[in-house]
Each structure stands twice: as structure tokens, then as C-alpha cells.
Amino acid sequence: MQVSVINIGNSKGIRLTKHLLEKYGIRDKVELILEKGRIILMPVSEPRKGWEKSFQSMRNNGHDNLLIDDVFPDENLDEWK
């Protein structure tokens, strides 16, 4: 696929169609990789985005309890000293 290089202020850039942006999951940022004479654009993945806000909400609502005890009754902690 060929795309035109266009002027954007004092810089130049390319336009990607809405279809390409949706197909490859590109939103606000891309990772630009320079590799063996090629420019590769990859969508930026933020798998933990929003976790902090969710964890704070869980804490505020009292939903941040342990599901499993962190120390078992038969555990010998002296062996770790």
C-alpha cells in the first residue's frame, strides 16, 4: 500500500485510514521501530492501564480482601531465618 507524505506544520507525516487504525488497534500512540532499512509501526499496548483506579475503587468499597490466607497453619516460618 502506498500513502502520501503530507506537510504537518514544520514536519511531515502520513495519514492512516480509520479502517487500518481499527484493524490494528491503533489509538493514541504507536511504537516506531527502525529495523534494517524499514520503519515499523506497532500499536502501543497498555494492558494494565486503569488498574490503579480500579484497585482504589476496590479498596474504598472493601472488596480488596485476600481470597487465600498468606500464611498457612502448617507453615514453618523458622526455616526461613
Image (cartoon, rainbow, N blue to C red):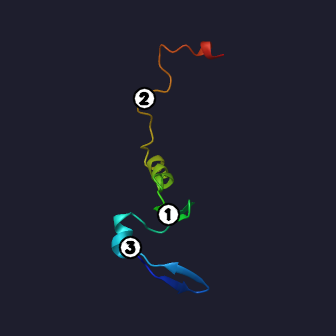
In this view, which residue lies farthest toward the front? 37
As drawn, 62 above or below 5: above
Find residue 1 and name its label. 3
Which residue matches tag 2?
68
The residue under the point 47% across, 16% down is 73
Query: Which residue is disc 1 drawn over?
Result: 40
Q: Nearer the viewer, residue 8 or 80?
A: 8
**How far apart are the alpha carbons under marks 1 and 2?**
45 Å
Q: Which mark is residue 27?
A: none
Q: Residues within 10 Å of mark 3 (few under 14, many from 20)?
A: few
Q: What residue type is labelled 3?
A: Met
25 vs 50, nearest the viewer? 25
x then y, percent, for residue 77: 58, 16
- Determine whether, in the image, residue 52 is placed left or right of residue 16: right
Q: Which residue is drawn at 48% across and 69% down?
A: 28
Question: Tag 2 or tag 3, which sits nearer the N-term?
Answer: 3
